[in-house]
Each structure stands twice: as C-alpha cells, then as structure tokens.
Image (cartoon, rainbow, N blue to C red):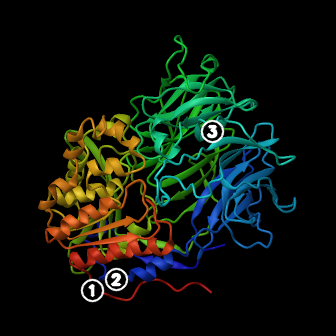
Amino acid sequence: MRAASLAVAVGCWVWGALASGAVPAPAPVRLDASAAYDALQRMVRIREVSLSPDGTRVAWAESVPGTAEAVRLQVRELAHPERAPVRITASKDGAPCAEGSLAWSLDGRQLAFLSTAGEGRSRQLYVADASGAGGPARRLTTVKGVLAAPKWSPDGKAVGLLVIEGSEDALGPRGPAARETGVVQTSSPVKRFAVVTVEDARLRLVSPAGLFIHEYAWSPDGARVAVTASPPPGDANWWNARVYAVEAGTGETSLLHAPRWQVAEPAWSPDGRQLAFIEGLMSDEGNTGGDVLVVSVPERLAAKVRFGEKAVLPAKVPPALDVTEGLKATATDLFWPQAERLVFVAQAQGEAAVMAVAPGGGEVATLWRGPEHVMVSLGRDGVTSAVVRDSVTQAPEVWTGPLGKWKQVTRLNADVRVAVGDVRSVTWTSDGQSVQGWLVLPVPDASGRKAPMVTVVHGGPAAGVLPAFSAQTVLLVARGYAVFMPNPRGSYGQGEAFVQANRRDFGFGDFNDVLAGLDAVLASAPVDPARQGITGWSYGGFLTMWAVTRTQRFQAAVAGAGIANWQSYYGTNHIDSWMLPYFGASVYDEPEVYTRSSPINGVKQVRAPTLVLHGERDMEVPASQGYEFHKALKTLGVKTQLVIYADEGHSLRKPEHVKDRLLRTLDWFDANLPAVPESKPKVRAPAR
C-alpha cells in the first residue's frame, strides 16, 4: 500500500548555487509543524527486511499508516517484479495487527513470524507458506509471556525462540518500568532459549535457568547454539554478557569467550568450527558497534559451565583474534556466508558501509559505501542482498540485488518529497584528531539572512549519526533551522579507539569536539552565531544540560531524558553496570569522577531558556534527573519548563507523546530564538 501523497517543501535551492552567484529563491512559506507531522505519519515505515536464503524472495514488514503498532508482512517473488506482493498474516479476517520478527526456512519455502493476531496481547509464533498458497498461517505457541527472535533450525524441523515465561510486561530497559510499591524486591525474569517443533508445536526450554539469553545463532549442523548471555536480571547485566555454546539437545553449556567489553552478533563459520562476533565498548543493548573477533570453537567446548562455580577457559586455548583491529570504522551487523569471507555492515566516518574481511584477518575490503542509512539482509551466497535504504531527503524503500548494485523493489513512499538547501558532511580537527558530523541547511530566503541553527547531539554515547530520514530533522529544517549533528569522540564510525576516547571524560573532550564543530560550521555555512539552540535525548540530553552550564553560545536548549547528576543517577537507575566501563569504578569508590561530569554542579552558569522532557517511568534515566535540573533552573530564575510523559519509559511509544515532544521542541526554539513569520503549511493534500 502506498502512503498518502505528501510533499514537505523545505526548499529547493542548494546553498552552493547561491555561493556561485545564483539569484536567491523567494522566502519559503513557513510550514505548520502539526500538519506536517501528521502528513509524515502517513508515510510507510519499513520495520525489517529479510531475503530468503536462496535469494529468490524478499519479505518485509511495513507499518500501517494511522495505527500505532499494526504491521503488514509482505513477500515478493524477485523473478516476477510485475506481480503484486503477497501478504502473509496470522489475522483470520485480515485486520491489521502487530506482526514481525521474520525468519525464513533454509529452503525459502516457509516463513516463521510473531503476531498478536491470536487471543490476548502476547505475540505468538506462527509459520506460513511463503507463496501465500498454503492456507492460513499456523499457530505454534500459546505462551503467557514474551517471545522474541524466531530462527529455523538447519534441518527445518524446528524453530528456535527466546522466551520469558509468565511476564507479559517485560518490555526491556527502554520500556516503562513497573511501578514499585510495598517491599521493593528485585524481579529477575529469565529469557531462555527454547525450541518449538513444527510438526507437533511442542515447546521445549533448552538453556539453563541461570542464564539470561540476549542473542543466539544456530550452528550449521543444528547441534548447538552460540549465545550471548548474562546472569539475571538481564536488563541490568547485558554489559557483563559472555559468549557461550548451549547444546540443543541437552542444554549443556560451555564458555566460548569472556570479553573485556560488550559482545553481540554471534555468527558461525559454515563448517561450525569457528565463531565470530562483534566486541567493543557499547553503551546500549541493541545499538551494536565494535571490532569483529573470531574464536576457534572445538577446544572451548571443554569449558563446561557449572552454575555456582566460575567458568574458566582451558589454559592453552588461543585468544580471540581481532580481524578488524585498527580499522577506522565500526562494525554493527555481522554475517559469515562463506568460509573465506566475513561480511559486516559498518559505520565509516558518518556513512554506511558494507565491508568484508578474511576470518584470519588481513586487508578489509569495502564492498559498498554511501551517505545514507541501510538495513541489510544477506543471502547465503554472500553477495545477493535485500536492503532498506533511506537518507535525509529520501524516505525508506526496499531494494534488492548484488551488494551495492541494488534495484528498487518498493515505491511505498514515492510521494514523499523533502527538499533541503544542502546536506553536507562536515569534518574538523579537535584536540589534534579528525571529527565528522552532518549539516542540513534550509532553503535560503531572499532577505539573505543567516539561518538559526539547532545542534542535535545523539544518545549513547556509543552510537553514531548517519544521514537518515528523520521527522525531527525534516521539521526543524522546514521551520528554517539549520541542523548540525556531530559525531564527537565516543561515537561510532572512526574505530574502537575513537569510541573509547571519552571514558572517564564525559562532557570534556566530547563537548570540545561539539564546540569545534560548531566553529567549523559557522566558518563555512550561512548560519547565525547569535541564534543557536541545542538538543538531545539520553546521553544527548546530558550533553545538552552540560552545554548550558559550560558556555553562553547557545540561546535555547531542549534536554530530553538527560542526566543532571551522575552521583544521584548511579543509585536510582536500573542499569548501572553500563557505567563501570566508562567511569572505571563505582560512584562509591571514586565519587570525584562522577562529580566532575555532573551538570548540576555548574547550574549557576546557566542563562539559556531550557526545556526539560522525561518519561514518567524511565528506568534507564529516572525522571528524578529531570526534576533535579528543572528545580535548580527555576530556583535560579532561569526560564524553564518540565514535561513528564505519563507511563513512558526511556523511549517514548505513545503517538501523542512522540508528536508532543517534537512540536514542543519546535515551539521552544521558536519562542527563544528569532522566529520566521507564520504561514500556512506547504503540505499537499492526500491523494484520492
């Protein structure tokens, strides 16, 4: 289904044309943000893409505009592009519901997926004929709890799953936390690896009850799975996860790797004798980044895990081999399709890339690289792929073909057009090292006035900004703001040493990079230094709070889910183990490291009007951090406002709250930075 017709006119003149002497465009009509936001919600979002192992079919999950969670699963035969895609669903009447987690059988004939189409609100496991000709999808589970990550066993007789039994409200660290009243006790639901046989729909829990499984991968012979796992509670201990092998028949568990940092993305070699994974300093589960490491498996299987005892690798086991050591890029997704080549998706100096390396190390080959955001699914030949591609000005679509030679499959968002003044990759030097960021400029108006600018600091800090399609960027630029998105030290994209460069240094070196980037933008782009705003969420919220306590260069700020006081934060958040790799010690052992980086200690320097936003039930960054900063500003006479979003966690989920956050942010900058005159929205009416 195609999204309703949408044209968000941000402008059509490139700044480079002005610089060469072209006549400026008339002043752009100022866009009504609410109408524009509603129009953006009518576009189709592609949640995931999955290529069949033989490369003949592609499946994807697309949002249903006008609904909060409903998703359509579509399958297309690539040999017949003229045919419409086939919808796969567990819904008996075809009504939209929440469906996803696509998994192909190895022969490419069946799809496993999760759906809420059955009774109750839990997602259950279904399998369906991928051609759509085999009748309705068949339900394989009736579990009260949480299911995730279905994957077919290599023999096609079973589907693996991750299962949390009896806890339908286990929404992860970014979801709203359960309210704690009465005697507060630690609740530790365990996510276990399970196997469901397709023939009789029998579910069998396999992994030990003492391990919380975060990810898994079937070995090629189906005898075992490699897992990343930690002791429960898993939400709090992911940063301490190790790599194990769990025997599929018995649940017997062996230690494969005890990492120094965080691990993710286990991938077996085709012969099952080696295992690769990504290891690096990571601040958030699910936001993977690091180097690619390889270990030999057979000799490690002797390191049996006996709970209550410390598992130790045999003395003569060779260490893991870092096959991308020193690479000026960050691996984010990993595949091992052929014996001689590992393939991985990466962030490289602010761009997306697909790279390859031999399992023994050596030169890393760049197979494709571009200024966009991609989601990749790779066929078993290691070449054929399906991707979701988007950029600052292009909404997401599905493409397929050999890596880097893709052809467009969908045109779900063909009517979504976003024109901007210019999109630039900006590089600068800070403290002797190269730093990169992205600058999106609005259409210049006839008056020749320089644009106000908002610096948007990403969360993490272990993350990176790619030039992806973003409602926030679209709306800010449409209102006449330039948008600067830096990747300071601590970010992905320039290698593991760069990611680790802000350890024990939050707010100092990384903020120096942001200010140096701001100087670089002001020196090269038509941006007004007297109309500067800054915003961010999570770590970006912290750096926003930090910014207004350290400099008067920003005239307005919006801090979302930020940390005002690292000392009080340590004792109130539910995931404090993430802090140890960054601070090097607990707050009880080295409180001065935490005090040094706390914005609250410089709050008397704040002059900029500051909007503070927070989720009521945020377990990652408790709302008390927002209250603490807001109260200090209010007491000191600084213009401020605090907004708490009811029943929200670290990531806002309710559509009305997501909209309010964006529009409130725009209104705050409009009110506290010189505004562009109001006008009607330049949004085309939906097509009939």
Q: CA distance from mark 2 to mark 3?
A: 49 Å
The residue carrying mark 3 is: 216
The residue carrying mark 2 is: 30
Q: Nearer the viewer, residue 142 or 257?
A: 142
N-terminal of the pair, mark 2 or mark 1, is 2
Question: How many residues crowd around disc 1 within 10 Å: few (fewer than 14), some, or many (20 or more)?
Answer: few
Question: How many residues crowd around disc 3 within 10 Å: few (fewer than 14), some, or many (20 or more)?
Answer: many
The residue carrying mark 1 is: 677
Q: Residue at x 71, y 65 (%)?
A: 120
Q: CA distance from mark 3 to mark 1?
A: 54 Å
Q: Total number of numbered labels?
A: 3
Tag 2 secondary structure? loop
| One can see residue 23 in this view | no
Dots 3, 1 in contact, CB < 8 A: no
Q: Which mark is residue 274?
A: none
- What is the three-letter code of the residue carrying label 2? Arg
Q: Nearer the viewer, residue 16 or 514?
A: 514
- What is the three-letter code of the residue carrying label 1? Pro
6 relative to 155, above or below: below
- What is the three-letter code of the residue carrying label 3? Tyr
N-terminal of the pair, mark 3 or mark 1, is 3
Dots 2, 1 in contact, CB < 8 A: yes
Residue 237 at x, y percent in the picture: 47, 40
Q: Quadrant of residue 22?
A: bottom left
54 relative to 63, above or below: above
Q: Quadrant of residue 282?
A: top left
Q: Residue at x 67, y 60 (%)?
A: 122
Residue 220 at x, y percent in the picture: 72, 31
Mark toward the viewer: 2 or 3: 3
